[in-house]
């Protein structure tokens, strides 16, 4: 090039001087040679340096000497040496291309041989600039020797000089190490000169250059912050007046390389455009000149920030030929940077510390820049945060330990030691110590760029979030030398903020006759001319002064910015913008520190200025120019002077003299303030205005326990305004959370239409609720430290609004604490089912949140809490009458319903000092409507409640009354409804009563004419009154009280119409260690309860005849009548007056008896107001309705007669006349003895007197008339009582040739102490065949094995016993060779059973017994051995053939089997053969329990064989048919009962409900019986059960018979795995408990050769890939969604990438698939991206697939993506993959 700058020449010379001192010294005793080399003869291309020797004395300061004194000293340096050998083309070159590369010589080598290089860049077009971007720059320079300074090093060491040759002042010298940076020329030329002083230091750089065009219009601005200052403003042309059309303006801002730039866009209003089309109207494009990251803006934008990546920014402003607007105002400033940050511009996203989750490196400085749109703010959520904690003093450490409960000396020392070792914060996040610059060691610093607000965090923190106010966030992470901490993992997202507010005129004054504008501004009593349109003009128009009265409420109207503008002829002459502040003093608006913008260069930093507002005027000046009567100081400056002129006053400032008679608005027209002594450049405007920009947004910092109140605008004074758009942001420190308590809330209804509403968002979890209408007692708690409240209204109806108390409370961060928002779920204590094993310093808390209109119900089915000292278990109900509900002891199941929409529990686990186990569920109580229609009553004290008698308004509404007792009282609730009026039909209005814990409920839809009761099972009842859509008069009046409860294991409730119950252990002795056993009988409102004790024996009365030891108490809950019974009683009955009865067995700890057995029934309840009644006195009278007049049509009358248990009742009818009817199906009277079951039906005219006597103590008489003829008088009579007989007798004779005999009360159980005789006589010369169709009596006496208790004895004609039968048997026959037979039936006083049915038939004496061979072709049947249940005959062979349809197979069940037994069954036996399949089984001996056998085909032969001796009772069998399975069986074991047996050779095994999750409390068995030489091989291909180390909860147990060897499996083992039995019988037992269902299992079984049991056990750790983001590279494998088979996370974006070797494709099979469903799969979905095929995507998959499905890729590289939203999640998928050949065979 041949050009060397003077600076370079100077530096080369300086280096030569320095090096001359260093080249060499040859020293003698008195003199020395000092050698140097001459400069290189050429700068490049190869030059020579010549050695120069000079003689000096050897002294501290050497002096020149003659050369002869140094003669003899040998110099070893060469006389010449080569230098600058590099090619001149390498170092001196000119570049003319539009882009290229510039590097140090020999880059990337670190050394450089030449001392000087120069590159000249000259672009071919003059309208371009050079942008030189250095990606690496490291020039170490000279060492600081010989008195050199740092400035000397940069000037004369290794330097790079950048110079625009067309602008001599545009030059920069650079040295040292720089982050990536840019340098921009102002012309099309740039010189780069490089000099280095030696080659053994680290020197290199690399840069790319490119060309950018310059504006042809001349609308350009170049700002070098090193020259023009570190901050300033950019504005559009004419700002704040409208810009011009067809502009193309460019602005380049360049800082020094170690800084970056921040642009603060204070005002932005361009022509509206579409950002998605790159704003093709008027727009501003902002680009980083190094990374070329850019954004394009148009329309109206919020104030926002833009942070550069490097030190250079390029702005291009383009306008078209159409509309023009105000433009933009941008402030800029520089900030330090260490290097290029990680920049995030796509949302959402994630970032972490370097090395996460492993320890981050020491001495790290790292930056993250998150850049959102101007209309957005940034939310950062730290999901894991573990940095080094802040430094603490000893006092702080002691205070921290005491806060955590370490107060005793030994524990305090332990705590301090843990802090020293860094262990404490690892165990408890509650030990956080705030970070400050003084205490922080490792920390993250978050800068909200636009607002310049900084937050610092360090230590160990729970999940928390941070919300910006502006659109851009800069995070800086710093670490010290410690490397023991994992760092943080964070996610970020953007949320929309309110649209930008318009400027609103609040004050305007016109120059003219106005003399007191400032006074009017300061006047806080009123507004001025608010209705005058001309008073708001920006031209003179009107001389009126305008002021909006809202200014006087300044601190309450949300002012964000204030603007002063001066106008002339409608154009802005000068403008000042201030930041809004919260102050009612109007003079505080205009303070120096609040100034954002002024058009004067020397007002950017406004120190030493006077902003004065008083009665005399408004002035912005410096201190020397602020006094209106002192205008003589030459340093006095003024920028704005609103000069009000008091009467008779004038000023010494010459420019103000014109204001002696009228107001003037003066301003400086100079770039800086006007000198007040001359007034030069001072002009005046004709209009002065003040504008504000305001909104109702709030950013509130919540300090712990310092509540704040927020409310809608005008709350308490007027309705809220229309078109409100308010966002309130609440934040507190990470160890706090935020709670909202809405004291009042009333807004427009119809939330679905989103008219007027409030939305609260928990920022950390992204959960939100929208609510509107009227709400009562709303509580809303965040999971972490940030919340947003959004308030919106429309143009229609408005209401009073809302008020809420907001408070920050300490956050429980223990692992046992949670906030739950699901609609239902389960809760257990820590370490359940064991008591908590470890202390949690903060205790354990669970808060359940429901939508604002709902309530929360806790239902505990297990609770036991014992403690030595005072920790508590409490339910926290913040809006309830009982704020805290303490619980302790062993409590019966109970519930608690919240008064608000949130309910919490808290307990303090303290091992060794307390014992706690609880299990609970939670659910929502659907919203009361209206919101306040919710009442709570404490039933510990009885009381009343009712609902209004007035007609309720139109519209469906829910009202709730909750009646309860404190759980520790162990009481239940009884409600008596004395008046229930419901006038709407078909359940359009109803009353529903529900037990909160058991969910037992009843719904009443019709008016109840009689009082009735409802008794809960537990401590709380919820009464819901639903008012339908139409107005109606409804009424409810009720009384409540409570009753003591018993242990739930001794409590039963009966709601069916009839049934049985008995005392514990009946018929064995009841236990004497239970205080009470209870039985609650609950009928509907129009029924009563009848209880009949068929056997009764408890301990007798005391000496006074009182039942006080053991007794049964019968409690009528309506009239509260209590009757006690004890001792032995004959069968007796008892009736309630109402619809409920409570039976209690109360025992002491002494005697034990057999107890009782009873039947119950719900009967129609007599209505005394109509007819019938309850009669319980010793005598009385009764009659039909209206007697003696006609009884009338459609009558139903119930008469219940009940007397004491030892009495019977005699009815005497004096008249009985009803409608004649042969069958008594019309009008009739039915009389029934409820103890024996005997009944008679009467109709027509019955002869009187008619007497009817019961055997028991209860008679129910029912009279019914139909809708036809009822002109009859009916009946009248009386009743009396008498003593009962204890023995039940029955004697009957049968003379017909055939008939049927039944035991008493059959098919109901026979009664005790029965003694019945049935005599059968047929024609002479014939025999009698008895066929017992059903037979069920008390079993044999186990001691004697005889029928000693209940029995049937058969006597022939000579009264000789032929057989004595008892127990339970299948159908059997007996033949009596006589024409007479007697059956004796006897029962004892204890047990009772169903009884018997026997058919008899006259048969010929000569007729031989029928052959025992049988053929069955029906679908079911019964067969027995001959004479069963008597002994079968000897030498008999019976063939029973079963031949059914081809599509069916046969199942045979031997219900009783007793044959002669011997190994291999050679004597008596039954052989069952599948004729077609050849399958055969042989049975003999006595076998307990049923035997099941299944065929594989439709044709079966059963062969019975007996030899000549040792007969037995034989067998009875039932056969059934079932379809032959198509393919393999699919069995769970729960298909019929709890055991399924099969002899199939193969089949499938599945869990119940598969492929859906199995149900709770399942107990299912599949028993597989194969041929003797076979074994079971079971293979599980899918398996997911609840996990437990010992498989104690849910499990599959595989058992081999006959050895009984078994193995259990649970959890999610690696599949497939197999199991083989040792024998030919195996059993699959599946068990699930009452908690945590899972997906279940699928497997198969098959018959294999028996070789011993072999198990290929599942591996303990499944290699299935289950991470959110993962890569798989094996040829096959399995993978799942995260957490599978539990639910995948919300807001997930997961990717499983699978790559197999080239030449293969990937086949993915989804074996289970359950993803949230939506028709277009827009919520949650799975899709597969084929990376190797150009990113081809499959369709989206969602929903629940019942069958597996497969996808085959087009390449060897795919991604399986899961995307979920923030609402519902499912179990996800389980998938396998394998590599398959990509060769396809065709043809």
Image: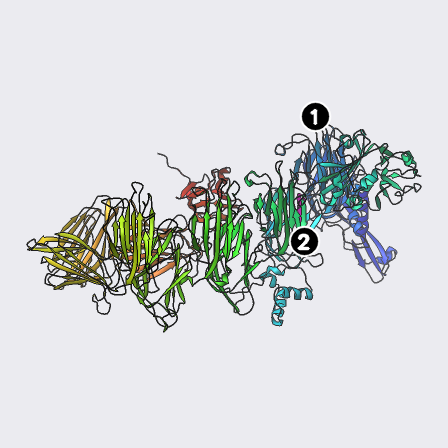
Q: Quadrant of the C terminus?
A: top left
For the image, the number of numbered tags is 2
> What secondary structure prevails in the magenta region?
strand
In terms of secondary structure, where does tag 2 sit?
A: strand
Kindly identify which residue carries mark 2. 456
Q: Nearer the viewer, residue 719 or 1430?
A: 719
> Residue 1593 sits in which quadrant?
bottom left
Q: Are marks 1 and 2 in contact (CB under 8 Å)?
A: no
Residue 674 appears in the rendering: yes
Q: Is residue 1740 magenta?
A: no
Q: Nearer the viewer, residue 179 or 381?
A: 381
In terms of secondary structure, where does tag 1 sit?
A: loop
Quote the CA–CA distance across marks 1 and 2. Answer: 49 Å
Looking at the image, the residue that sits furthest to the front is 1188
Percent position (x, y) of residue 1351?
21, 63
Q: Quadrant of the N terminus?
A: top right
Position of 588 compared to 1368: left or right? Answer: right
> Residue 1330 sits in which quadrant?
bottom left
Kindly identify which residue carries mark 1. 321
Q: Earlier in the sequence, mark 1 or mark 2?
A: 1
Q: Nearer the viewer, residue 574 or 854?
A: 854
Percent position (x, y) of residue 838?
53, 65
Q: Nearer the viewer, residue 1620 or 1266?
A: 1266
Q: Residues within 10 Å of mark 2 (few under 14, many from 20)?
A: some
Looking at the image, the residue that sits furthest to the bottom is 1103
Percent position (x, y) of residue 1637?
43, 53
Label at residue 1572? none
> Residue 774 sits in which quadrant?
top right
Q: Which residues are magenta?
A: 467-476
Residue 1544 appears in the rendering: no
């Amino acid at each position: 090039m041949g050009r060397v700058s003077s600076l370079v020449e100077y530096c080369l010379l300086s280096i030569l001087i320095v090096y001359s001192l260093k080249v060499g010294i040859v020293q003698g005793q008195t003199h020395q040679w000092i050698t140097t080399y001459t400069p290189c003869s050429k700068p490049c291309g190869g030059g020579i340096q010549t050695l120069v020797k000079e003689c000096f004395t050897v002294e501290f300061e050497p002096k020149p000497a003659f050369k002869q004194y140094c003669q003899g000293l040998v110099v070893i340096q060469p006389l010449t040496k080569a230098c600058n050998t590099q090619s001149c083309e390498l170092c001196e070159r000119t570049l003319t291309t539009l882009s290229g590369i510039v590097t140090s010589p020999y880059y990337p080598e670190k050394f450089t041989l030449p001392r000087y290089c120069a590159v000249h860049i000259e672009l071919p077009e003059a309208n371009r600039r050079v942008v030189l971007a250095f990606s690496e720059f490291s020039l170490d320079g000279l060492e600081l020797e010989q008195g050199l300074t740092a400035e000397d090093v940069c000037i004369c060491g290794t330097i790079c000089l950048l110079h625009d040759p067309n602008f001599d002042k545009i030059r920069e010298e650079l040295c040292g190490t720089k982050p990536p940076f840019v340098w921009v020329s102002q012309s099309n030329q740039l010189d780069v000169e490089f000099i280095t002083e030696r080659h053994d230091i680290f020197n290199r750089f690399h840069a790319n250059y490119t060309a950018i065009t310059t504006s042809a219009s001349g609308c350009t601005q170049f700002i070098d912050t090193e020259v023009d200052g570190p901050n300033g403003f950019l504005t559009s042309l004419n700002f704040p007046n409208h810009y011009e059309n067809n502009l193309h303006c460019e602005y380049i801002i360049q800082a020094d390389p170690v800084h970056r730039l921040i642009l603060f866009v204070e005002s932005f209003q361009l022509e509206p455009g579409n950002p998605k089309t790159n704003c093709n109207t008027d727009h501003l494009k902002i680009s980083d000149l190094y990374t070329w990251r850019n954004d394009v803006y148009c329309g109206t934008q919020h104030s926002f920030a833009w942070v550069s990546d490097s030190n250079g920014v390029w702005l291009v402003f383009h306008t078209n030929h159409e509309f023009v607007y105000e433009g933009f105002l941008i402030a800029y400033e520089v900030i330090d940077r260490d290097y290029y940050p990680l920049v995030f511009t796509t949302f959402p996203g994630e970032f972490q510390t370097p090395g996460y989750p492993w320890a981050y490196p020491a001495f790290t400085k790292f930056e993250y820049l998150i850049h959102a749109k101007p209309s957005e703010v940034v939310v950062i959520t730290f999901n894991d945060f573990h940095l080094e904690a802040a430094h603490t003093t000893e006092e702080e450490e002691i205070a921290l330990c005491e806060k955590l409960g370490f107060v005793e000396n030994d524990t305090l020392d332990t705590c301090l030691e843990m802090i020293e070792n860094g262990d404490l914060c690892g165990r408890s996040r509650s030990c956080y110590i705030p970070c400050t610059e003084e205490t922080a060691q490792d920390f993250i610093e978050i800068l909200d760029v636009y607002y310049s607000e900084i937050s610092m965090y360090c230590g160990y923190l729970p999940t928390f979030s941070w919300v910006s106010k502006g659109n851009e966030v800069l995070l800086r992470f710093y670490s010290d030398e410690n490397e023991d901490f994992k760092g943080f993992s964070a996610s970020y997202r953007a949320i929309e903020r309110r649209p930008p507010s318009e400027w609103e005129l609040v004050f305007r004054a016109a120059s003219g006759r106005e003399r007191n504008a400032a006074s009017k501004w300061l006047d806080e009593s009123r507004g001025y001319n608010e209705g005058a349109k001309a008073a708001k003009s920006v031209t003179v128009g009107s001389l009126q002064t305008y002021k909006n009265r809202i200014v006087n409420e300044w601190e309450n109207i949300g002012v964000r910015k204030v603007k002063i503008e001066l106008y002339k002829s409608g154009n802005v002459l000068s403008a000042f913008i201030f930041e809004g502040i919260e102050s009612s003093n109007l003079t505080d608006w205009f303070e120096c520190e609040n100034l954002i913008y002024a058009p004067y260069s020397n007002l950017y930093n406004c120190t030493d200025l006077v902003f004065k507002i008083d009665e005399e005027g408004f002035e912005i000046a410096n201190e020397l120019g602020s006094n209106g009567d002192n205008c003589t100081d030459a340093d006095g400056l003024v920028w704005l002077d609103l000069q009000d002129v008091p009467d008779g006053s004038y000023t010494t400032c010459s420019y103000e003299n014109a204001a002696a008679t009228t107001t003037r608005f003066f301003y400086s027209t100079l770039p800086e303030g006007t000198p007040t002594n001359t007034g030069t450049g001072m002009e005046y405007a004709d209009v002065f205005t003040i504008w504000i920009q305001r909104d109702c947004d709030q950013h509130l910092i919540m300090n712990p326990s310092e509540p704040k109140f927020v409310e809608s605008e005008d709350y308490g004074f007027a309705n809220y305004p229309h078109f409100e758009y308010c966002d309130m942001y609440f934040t507190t420190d990470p160890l706090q959370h935020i709670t909202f308590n809405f004291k009042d809330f009333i807004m427009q209804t119809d939330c679905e239409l989103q008219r007027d509403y409030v939305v609260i968002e928990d920022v950390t979890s992204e959960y939100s609720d929208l609510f509107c209408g009227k709400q009562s007692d709303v509580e809303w708690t965040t999971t972490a430290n940030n919340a947003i409240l959004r308030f919106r209204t429309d143009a229609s109806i408005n209401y009073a609004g809302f008020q809420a108390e907001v408070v920050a409370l300490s956050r429980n961060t223990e692992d046992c604490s949670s906030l739950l928002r699901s609609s239902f779920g389960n809760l257990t204590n820590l370490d359940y089912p064991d008591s908590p094993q470890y202390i949690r310093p903060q205790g354990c808390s669970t808060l359940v949140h429901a939508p604002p209109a709902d309530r929360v119900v806790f239902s505990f089915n297990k609770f036991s809490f014992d403690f030595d000292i005072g920790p508590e278990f409490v339910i926290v109900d913040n809006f309830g009458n009982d704020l805290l509900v303490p619980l302790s002891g062993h409590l019966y199941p109970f519930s608690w319903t919240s008064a608000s929409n949130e309910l919490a529990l808290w307990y303090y686990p303290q091992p060794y000092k307390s014992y706690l186990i609880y299990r609970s569920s939670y659910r929502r109580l659907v919203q009361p409507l209206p919101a306040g229609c919710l009442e709570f009553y404490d039933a510990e004290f009885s009381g009343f409640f009712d609902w209004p008698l007035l007609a309720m308004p139109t519209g469906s509404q829910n009202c709730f009354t909750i009646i309860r007792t404190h759980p520790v009282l162990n009481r239940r609730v009884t409600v008596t409804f004395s008046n229930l009026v419901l006038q709407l039909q078909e359940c359009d209005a109803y009353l529903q009563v529900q037990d909160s814990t058991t969910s037992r409920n009843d719904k009443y839809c019709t008016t109840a004419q009689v009082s009735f009761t409802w008794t809960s099972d537990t401590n709380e009842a919820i009464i819901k009154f639903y008012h339908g859509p139409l107005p109606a008069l409804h009424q409810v009046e009720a009384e409540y009280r409570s009753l003591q409860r018993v242990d739930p294991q001794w409590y039963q409730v009966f709601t069916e119409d009839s049934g049985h119950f008995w005392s514990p252990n009946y018929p064995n002795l009841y236990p004497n260690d239970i205080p009470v056993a209870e039985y609650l009988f609950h009928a509907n409102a129009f029924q009563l309860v009848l209880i009949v004790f068929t056997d009764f024996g408890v301990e007798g009365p005391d000496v006074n005849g009182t039942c006080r030891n053991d007794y049964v108490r019968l409690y009528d809950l309506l009239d509260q009548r209590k009757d006690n019974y004890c001792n032995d009683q004959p069968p007796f009955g008892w009736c309630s007056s109402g619809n409920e009865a409570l039976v209690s067995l109360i025992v002491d700890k002494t005697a034990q008896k057999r107890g009782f057995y009873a039947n119950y029934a719900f009967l129609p309840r007599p209505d005394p107001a109509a007819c019938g009644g309850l009669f319980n006195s010793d005598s009385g009278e009764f009659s039909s309705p209206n007697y003696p007049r006609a009884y009338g049509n459609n009558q139903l009358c119930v008469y219940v007669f009940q007397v004491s248990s030892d009495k019977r009742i005699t009815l005497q009818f004096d008249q009985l006349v009803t409608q004649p009817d042969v069958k008594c199906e019309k009008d009739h009277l039915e009389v029934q003895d409820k103890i024996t079951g005997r009944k008679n039906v009467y109709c027509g005219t019955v002869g009187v007197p008619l007497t009817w006597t019961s055997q028991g103590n209860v008679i129910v008489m029912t009279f019914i008339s139909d809708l036809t003829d009822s002109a009859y008088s009916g009946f009248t009579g009386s009743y009396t009582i008498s003593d009962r007989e204890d023995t039940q007798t029955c004697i009957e004779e049968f003379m017909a040739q055939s008939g049927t005999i039944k035991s008493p009360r059959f098919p109901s159980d026979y009664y005790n102490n029965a003694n019945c005789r049935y005599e059968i006589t047929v024609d002479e010369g014939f025999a009698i065949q008895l066929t017992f169709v059903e037979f069920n009596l008390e079993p044999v006496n186990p001691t004697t094995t005889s029928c000693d208790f209940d029995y049937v004895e058969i006597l022939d004609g000579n009264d000789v016993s032929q057989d004595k039968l008892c127990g339970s048997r299948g159908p059997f026959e007996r033949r009596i060779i006589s024409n007479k037979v007697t059956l004796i039936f006897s029962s004892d006083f204890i047990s009772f059973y169903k009884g018997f049915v026997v058919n008899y038939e006259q048969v010929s004496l000569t007729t031989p017994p029928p052959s025992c061979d049988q053929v069955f072709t029906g679908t079911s049947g019964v067969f027995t051995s001959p004479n069963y249940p008597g002994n079968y005959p000897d030498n008999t062979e019976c063939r029973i053939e079963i031949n059914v349809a081809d599509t069916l197979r046969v199942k045979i069940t031997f219900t009783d089997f007793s044959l002669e037994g011997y190994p291999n069954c050679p004597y008596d036996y039954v052989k069952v053969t599948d004729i077609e399949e050849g399958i055969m089984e042989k049975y003999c001996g006595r076998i307990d329990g049923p035997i099941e056998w299944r065929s594989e085909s439709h044709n079966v032969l059963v062969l019975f064989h007996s030899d000549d001796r040792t007969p037995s009772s034989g067998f009875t069998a039932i056969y059934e048919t079932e379809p032959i399975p198509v393919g393999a069986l699919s069995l769970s074991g729960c298909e019929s009962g709890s055991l399924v047996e099969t002899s199939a050779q193969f089949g499938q095994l599945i869990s119940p409900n598969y492929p859906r999750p199995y149900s709770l409390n399942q107990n299912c068995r599949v028993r597989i019986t194969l041929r003797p030489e076979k074994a079971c091989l079971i293979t599980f291909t899918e398996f997911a059960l609840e996990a437990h180390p010992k498989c104690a909860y849910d499990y599959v147990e595989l058992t081999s018979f006959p050895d009984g060897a078994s193995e259990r499996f649970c959890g999610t083992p690696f599949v497939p795995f197999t199991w083989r039995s040792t024998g030919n019988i195996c059993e699959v037992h599946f068990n699930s408990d009452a908690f945590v269902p899972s997906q279940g299992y699928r497997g198969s079984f098959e018959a294999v050769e028996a070789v011993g049991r072999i198990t290929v056990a599942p591996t303990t750790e499944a290699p299935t890939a289950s991470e959110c983001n993962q890569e798989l590279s094996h040829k096959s494998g399995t993978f799942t969604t995260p957490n599978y088979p539990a639910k995948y996370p919300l807001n997930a974006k997961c990717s499983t990438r699978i790559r197999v070797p080239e030449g293969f494709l990937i086949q993915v099979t989804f074996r289970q698939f359950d993803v949230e469903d939506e028709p277009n799969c827009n919520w949650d979905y799975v899709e597969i991206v084929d990376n190797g095929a150009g990113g081809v995507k499959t369709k989206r998959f969602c929903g629940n697939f019942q069958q597996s499905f497969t996808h085959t890729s087009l390449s060897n590289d795919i991604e399986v993506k899961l995307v979920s939203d923030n609402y519902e999640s499912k179990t996800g998928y389980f998938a396998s993959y394998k590599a398959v050949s990509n060769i396809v065979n065709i043809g």
